Amino acid sequence: MIEKTKYLSDFEAKKLICEIGRRIYNKNFVAANDGNISVKCGPNTIWTTPTGVSKGFMTPDMMVKMDLGGKVISGKMKPSSEVKMHLRVYNENPEVNAVVHAHPPVATSFAIAGINLEKPISPEAVVLLGTVPVAPYATPGTQEVPDSIAPYCKDHNAVLLANHGALTWGRDLIEAYYRMESLEHYALMHMYSNNIINKANELSCTQIDDLIQIRQKLGINTGGVPSCTPEQSSPIKQTSQMAEEPNKNELIEAVVRKVTESVLKQLQS
């Protein structure tokens, strides 16, 4: 039986967008009028944030209703020019019901450096995010941006925008927002372990497989699988193997010696 998607009412959608806007503003994920948020309120309609307004100071009456083709249905303000990204995600991946765009400082720093977030250093990051690629640079507000993220919309849960920021999506607005939080937290751990402490014990292939199974049980089938290194033999096992090696060599030498003696005796008789 196919579960029918339950959409938020117009009232609920606009109110929740304002709440998520305050959260990303208070967490310093955006500055001034940066960022944008959207959520589906029907199979072909969304509510989204207006242009030129701080995400920390929005009110429900500012929201803009649009269809997935980009046509404004209602609202007294204009939508952000970057809503094109949101529309592309919805059209590429019908399972997505909400999108969040922000500029979290650490994750955006990786985007500026052109570094993918894909090292398996945190179980939570593997389960909630998977791998996070960097999309090629595109001028904000242009059609280049949605084109740059299109290859990642179906198989990932987030993407870094080169020299720009980050984009996350989910089955509902809370999940899309939590992925933005998780993304910044993952980027922070990545920076500390790999660039400050300069040591990171990455998860093994077996450990990652276990986490992927957990992810699937949560109904998450996207995110990709981080690369991993097969488990190495433990020091105790390695020591045992090294100790066994001389014994094998000694046994071979003894057998050869016995055979040689037997052959020599036969030749002398």
Image: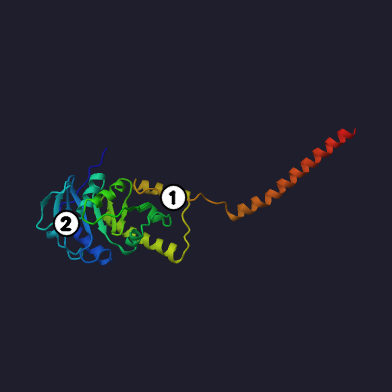
Q: Does residue 92 appear in this view?
A: yes
For the residues carrying marks 2 and 1, which lies nearer the camera in this image? 1
| Helix, strand or loop for disc 1 | loop
| Helix, strand or loop for disc 2 | helix
Q: Is residue 144 left or right of residue 124?
A: left
Q: Which mark is residue 14?
A: 2
Residue placed farthest to the right in the image?
269
Q: Residues within 10 Å of mark 2 (few under 14, many from 20)?
A: many
Label 2 – label 1 distance at C-alpha? 40 Å
Colour pattern: rainbow
Closer to the camera, 171 or 81? 81
The x and y percentages for residue 168 are: 28, 54
Q: Please give the name of the residue rendered at 22% of the width and 64% of the height, measured from the top-left corner.
A: 22
For the residue marked with disc 2, what is the amino acid?
Lys
The x and y percentages for residue 166 are: 29, 57
Point out the image quarter for the C terminus. top right
Q: Is residue 221 left or right of residue 6?
A: right
Q: Please give the name of the residue rendered at 81% of the width and 39% of the height, measured from the top-left corner.
A: 260
The x and y percentages for residue 122 are: 41, 57
Q: Earlier in the sequence, mark 2 or mark 1?
A: 2
Q: Are marks 2 and 1 in contact (CB under 8 Å)?
A: no
Look at mark 1 in the image and give the residue it sits on. Answer: 227
Position above or below: 33 against 258: below
For the residue marked with disc 1, what is the amino acid?
Ser
Q: Please give the name of the residue rendered at 36% of the width and 57% of the height, measured from the top-left corner.
A: 114
The x and y percentages for residue 54 are: 19, 64
